[in-house]
Amino acid sequence: MKKILTLVLVITLCSAIIRGRDAQLNGYAPGGAGKYIEVYSQPDPITGQPVLIDRIQIPDNENFSSSIDCNNICWLRLRYGVYEFILVVEKGGSYQLKLPGYIARTKAEKLNPFFEYELTHINVAGNDNINNRIKYIDSLFFNYTNRITRSIYLGEPLGGKDSLLKSFARIEELITGDYSARYYEYRYCLLKMISEKQTVPGSDDLALINRTFLPHMPAYTDLVSQVFNGYLRRLANDSQTSSLRVCINSGGPYHEIVRLIQEQEIIRDTSLLEFVMLSNLYNEYYMGGFRKEGVEKIFEWMSANAMNKYNRQLAGIITEKITRLKPGNIPPGFRLMNPDGKIYTLDSLRGKFTILAFGTMELPETKYELDILNNWTGEYKDRLAVVVILLEDDFKSSLERLGNDNYDFIFLDGSESTGLVQDYEIKYSPVFYFLNKDLRLIRSPAVLPSENLWGSVVLQLRDGLMDNIRD
């Protein structure tokens, strides 16, 4: 969608605290009756996963209301149809929202894990508002950054680079409020580094980064990511700090890792140091820079023992994410209905080996793969269950198109479980998982039936049968 519709927000800030620490959201959503506004936290800066805070159902009169717990300043994401709006709220603030006309996501968009919402900052009535100030700072920052990086990428000189920096510096005089001023400082620091192609920050920049740990502020975390991207790998490759690699690969000791990093006298704030460790090790976990088992131990230790509460929680999120679908673990649970209205949970499948499939009749590959599966699974139905979760909105229509009477499978309605695609990290459809009798993952994900899933499954069934005989 090329045309960006504007969200008009009329906001009244109250001096009194509303319901303790709550920020009050009230508004009008034309065409949205019966639909939902999903209120998320700002996606965390490492895994990028937001947390659902509230799900506001829009009543028939299309006027909605909700209270959001906010201890100080909170960054929110409001998902509404195809839109996602950035809203910064303050403790005790009252916000009157007027949303654009509701446009629903299509079936294809809902099933597409790479779907991108129409993301925009909120427009706010009145100049002296934190949302307006941040939007103004970011509009210039991204404009100038794109122009500078484009010239660098194309190898073309940018004659007005100094003018861009001076122009951005002048807006500092227009910024009011401590939070907005800090936001501007971090954006200016990053813009300056990009324009000067700095890989190592100056002493003033480091002092700025170490001054206050603000992991909820995107301008701060963007700057930290730029400065410390690949930092642990560089230290581990340095002959003078090569013992860092040994410590990380072995999963600790944690305090020795911290000591080696602190000796560089670059990161002085302990909370920042923990955050840089989490960010670096998360990236290296997928890039293969360090031994995965060692990194997992460090994440697990930090989830219980990191000094900063935010970092403890973030380490827990990372640990859950990287181990959620790891072979040997039990996958995320669900509670779904079959065509007869019977409820199935993950625990309902205990006692048999299970092939768990996610698919959609929007893509012909699902039926093609299920037909292959159906050719041989009946031979093992006493020990093997096949569970197919269909992700379309219309479960009945999907079954009719599939012709489910031809299959001896358990079909479940996945249309109302909005978290399935995220929980099972479904990047394509269909996708298959193979679980043992105790519901632990054996193949995650498994190969497709057309890629000889039969071989993997039958080998496990035979081993399980021999175990039963020995018992």
Image (tube, rainbow, N blue to C red):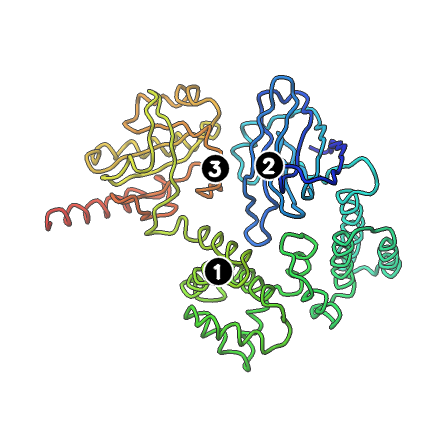
What's the amino acid at mark 2? Val
Q: Which image quadrant is residue 358 in?
A: top left
Q: Secondary structure at mark 2?
A: strand
What's the amino acid at mark 3? Gly
What's the amino acid at mark 1? Tyr
Q: Quadrant of the N terminus?
A: top right
> Residue tagged by mark 2?
39
Viewer-nearest of discs 3 and 1: 3
Residue at left offset 80%, top offset 35%: 125
> Residue tagged by mark 3?
419
Marked residue nearer the N-terminal end (3 or 2): 2
Residue, far bottom: 240
Residue at left offset 56%, top offset 44%: 50
In 3D space, how far apart are the residues under numbered discs 1 and 2 (Cα atoms)?
Answer: 30 Å
* Position of residue 34 in the picture relative to residue 444 (left or right): right
Q: Secondary structure at mark 3?
A: loop
* Front one among 360 and 135: 135
> Residue tagged by mark 1?
285
